[in-house]
Image: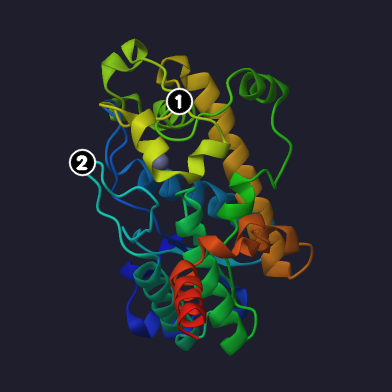
Amino acid sequence: MKDLSLLTWKEIKELDKDKSIVSVVLAPIEEHGWHLPLATDLLEGEHWSRGALARAEEELDAGCFYLPAFPVAAASVNEFYGSIHFSMRTTCTVTREILESLCCMGFKHIVVIASHADPQHQIAVEKAVRKVNRKYGVRAIAPMGPIFMGTGVEEEKELKSFQEEHPDDYHAGWVETASLLDMDPGYVREGYRDLPDTRITDRDMIFRKKQLRAMGAYGHMGSPRHASPELGRMLNENCVASLCDAVVKFYRRSGYEPYARYALYRILPLHLGFLRKVRRAKNRKEKD
Ligand SMILES: [Zn+2]
């Protein structure tokens, strides 16, 4: 596994593209409560991507490469202090242009790690992947959306039951706090155990105002106090194993399809410009 950006163009040109895999991390610089750094999603993306590539390289007759993470992402809540977000349109364009550059270099197996679960980000990235695959043939996949929705290898029993007992943990709660504790406890501020739980249901997550209300003065949605390095190890292990499974199957172009199907992609109102189009059509009707 190598950092592609540390090679020269000549070295890259000489790589056997049939036997090369490139990963691209796209995630935001974004507030993650009082206790986690702005780079949380970027750190997670790099950790999972490198873990999965190292494992895939052992399993496949392929060389694996990663690029420095791109701090570009779309999000549904932009008002909270400390975040740098982009529109869905910009995120889609940037993703497409990165992928087109890699296609022009001849790469055929590109894995986009969109390590930020917000549906707006996932849809923007997925849209770019589909455009590129239509133009160049299937060359890219963005498996994180499906993995966040439960596609992938079976979780350890202990993790599964903990998740059932502590649901609705969406942002900088026990899931992300644990994930960072496992990577490096130095990323997590000591007071995380004293933070209050903030509650929001699955259904209310689609309302921006309800999200903001739940975040309150803190910024997290969930229960950071339940985090532990052991939970983090299980979470990260499951993510790396699922991602590796996606990479291996995509490289072989066999059985990867569940990782290319983001369930929320079919929900039209989440798409960029959809509501504007509906409003325009409605106005037109009213004029007629
Ligand atoms: Zn996050």
Do labels 1 and 2 touch, CB within 8 Å?
no
Residue 108 appears in view: no
Please tell me which of labels 1 and 2 falls first in the chain. Answer: 2
Residue 282, disc: none
Residue underneath mark 2: 81
Residue 254 appears in view: yes
Q: Position of residue 12 (x, y in %)?
A: 42, 80
Q: Picture quarter containing residue 61?
A: bottom right
Q: Which residue is at the front of the view, 285 or 120?
A: 285
Q: Residue at x 72, y 23 (%)?
A: 157
Q: Residues within 10 Å of mark 1 (few under 14, many from 20)?
A: many
Q: Position of residue 98 (x, y in %)?
A: 40, 75
Question: Which three-letter amino acid code belongs to the residue tagged 1?
Answer: Gly
Residue underneath mark 1: 222
- Left or right: residue 249 versus residue 101 is right
* Residue 11 to residue 247: above or below: below
Question: Which three-letter amino acid code belongs to the residue tagged 2?
Answer: Tyr
Q: Picture quarter containing residue 234?
A: top right
Q: Position of residue 143 (x, y in %)?
A: 60, 57
Q: Residue furthest left?
A: 81
